[in-house]
Amino acid sequence: MQGDRPKAYRPIPPDRRRAALEAGLQAYERGDFFEAHELLEPAWMGTSDPAERALYQGLIKLAAGYVHAVRGNPIGLGRHLEAARKHLVTSVELDPRWIEEAGIDLNNLLLEVDVRLASVRSAEAHLETNSAAMLELAEAAPRIR
């Protein structure tokens, strides 16, 4: 269980999870972060494999972080980037096959997430009064592949 609620689980076949992953990554690459989040959810809910779930959840958190960035919420961006990092690392620790099969360069992605986390942390006071700076961070969302 996560918090007080059980993890959502609505099984879907591997080919549909893969299609959801591809569609979600394409939306992310277009900068449509909300759509990416929505498209990745069925894959996350559709598997019981902990490493695969962690991969999807990490990508969902990454996309959700940039939804917050576009809305000018540095705290939401930072929290989601931290959670994304944690889930992606968990995925590779449990079974690196999922990240490899998705074609994700995890080392590079984590470096890019860390750079953005450092930027958010060092600029929080400025970002609270200047939402334009937040949009600059949103435009520079880390590449997943």
Image: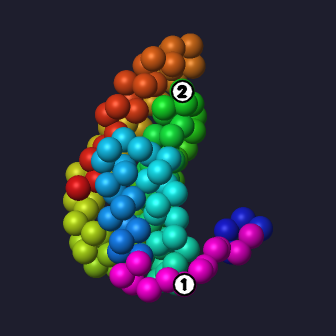
- Mark 1: amino acid: Pro
Residue that mark 2 sits on: 72
The range drawn in magenta is 5-16
Q: Residue at x 52, y 78 (%)?
A: 46
Q: Residue at x 34, y 57 (%)?
A: 25
Q: Is residue 84 magenta?
A: no
Q: Nearer the viewer, residue 90 or 99?
A: 99
- Mark 2: amino acid: Gly
Q: Main secondary structure of the magenta part?
A: loop
Q: Is residue 119 visible?
A: no
Badge 2: how crowded within 10 Å, few (<14), some, or many (20+)?
A: many
Q: Quadrant of the C terminus?
A: bottom left
Q: Quadrant of residue 3?
A: bottom right
For the view shown, which residue lies furthest in the right direction? Answer: 4
Return the mark for residue 11: 1
Helix, strand or loop status at disc 1: loop
Q: Quadrant of residue 85?
A: bottom left
Q: Earlier in the sequence, mark 1 or mark 2?
A: 1
Q: Quadrant of the N terminus?
A: bottom right
Q: Nearer the viewer, residue 43 or 85?
A: 43
Instruction: Give the distance between the C-alpha atoms of the residues marked 1 and 2, in whole angstroms.
Output: 35 Å
In the displayed structure, does residue 128 sit left or right of residue 32? right
Q: Position of residue 109 (x, y in %)?
A: 28, 52
Residue 140, above or below 123: below
